[in-house]
Amino acid sequence: MNGAQGPMRDAVIEVRGVRNQFGRQVVHDGLDIDVYRGEILGVVGGSGTGKSVLLRTIVGLNRPKAGEIRVFGTDVLRAPPAERRAIERRWGVLFQDGALFSSLTVRQNVEVPMREHLDLSPALRAELAELKVAMVGLPPEANDKFPSELSGGMRKRAGLARALALDPEILFLDEPTAGLDPIGAAAFDTLLHDLGETLGLTVFLVTHDLDTLVATTDRIAVLAEKRVLVTGTMEDMVRQDHPWIREYFCGPRARAARGAAAAGNR
Ligand SMILES: Nc1ncnc2c1ncn2[C@@H]1O[C@H](COP(=O)(O)OP(=O)(O)OP(=O)(O)O)[C@@H](O)[C@H]1O
């Protein structure tokens, strides 16, 4: 997308030398990554390579043992709480399971970040929440439903509506299409692509889904050997020699995903 190409790329997230360790298990060591304004960056890697840990580290849910993380130029690990809060308002997160509050309706779930960060009248807040629900392609009836009354795909969309509640500039998504059937996943990919374009979002997308990578991402970052081993386009990935990258990007599933995209199926 727009900001991702050209010589003057503006990094909205800069991660340098991050080390994450749990007990004796070192998950990341000397990890660097940049995410550029307006791009959809797909983060892939084998199971346990620390994709979710990286996402959680950037959004402040996991404190790294070492390293520096800048978001919009601010050192988020060392910023005073008020400055951190101001940065947090500028991103939205969709966790793997949607992480909706089961005792709240969809509308109320979307209102949660608004209550926390915005001083709005209840009527205006409800109206704005309903706008977000419509934006992610849910019908108006969904507003008054509880998460347990929704399908998996609808729950993901509701989680996305909540992630978009504060009109974020950055969206973090952890496996958004996991557990969806192929049609639901393709619909979610289209939604993500369209929202990215219309809202000018920068997206940090953790995924295993090759179709999602092909359909939505501008760039891909591969986690392996405790760091970001390679970043580049899908075409760049196909040319890599690393065994995991070859197996993942040149295997039959990857070929099928690229073939389907070339044929305009997604
Ligand atoms: N809070 C924690 N305490 C201890 N170990 C953790 C913690 N969080 C993550 N880990 C470990 O860190 C490693 C990386 O986990 P992570 O969930 O980031 O992997 P992933 O790449 O997202 O994997 P998957 O693709 O299977 O979802 C795993 O071995 C996990 O057990």
Image: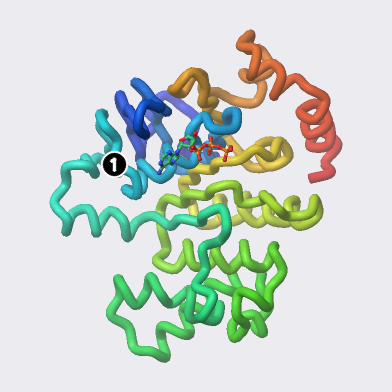
Please tell me in which quadrant of the rendered image residue 106 appears: bottom right
Please tell me in which quadrant of the rendered image residue 238 appears: top right
Q: Which residue is pictured at 42% across the width and 37% down the height?
A: 54
Q: Secondary structure at mark 1?
A: loop
**Residue corresponding to mark 1:** 63
What is the x, y in percent for residue 76?
Answer: 24, 44
Give above or below for 91 relative to 131.
Answer: above
Residue 135 placement, left or right of 256: left
Residue 180 placement, left or right of 84: right
Q: Which residue is pictured at 69% across the width and 64% down the height?
A: 152
Q: Which residue is pictured at 55% across the width and 39% down the height?
A: 1
What is the x, y in percent for residue 80?
Answer: 13, 51
Residue 236 placement, left or right of 132: right
Disc 1 packing (10 Å; few <14; some 14–19; many ≥20): some
Give above or below for 218 relative to 95.
Answer: above
Q: Between residues 258 and 181, which one lies in front from this camera angle?
A: 181
The amino acid type, in three-letter code, at marker 1 is Arg
Quadrant, the C terminus: top right
Give above or below for 49 relative to 147.
Answer: above
Q: Which residue is pictured at 68% across the width and 73% down the height?
A: 150
What is the x, y in percent for residue 53?
Answer: 43, 39
Give above or below for 68 relative to 107.
Answer: above
Q: Between residues 150 and 103, which one lies in front from this camera angle?
A: 103
Q: Between residues 33 and 227, which one lies in front from this camera angle?
A: 227
Does the image show residue 130?
A: no
Q: Between residues 40 and 76, which one lies in front from this camera angle?
A: 76
What is the x, y in percent for residue 143?
Answer: 59, 82
Task: Return the residue found at the far top.
Answer: 241
Does the image show residue 224?
A: yes
Task: Return the residue found at the far left.
Answer: 80
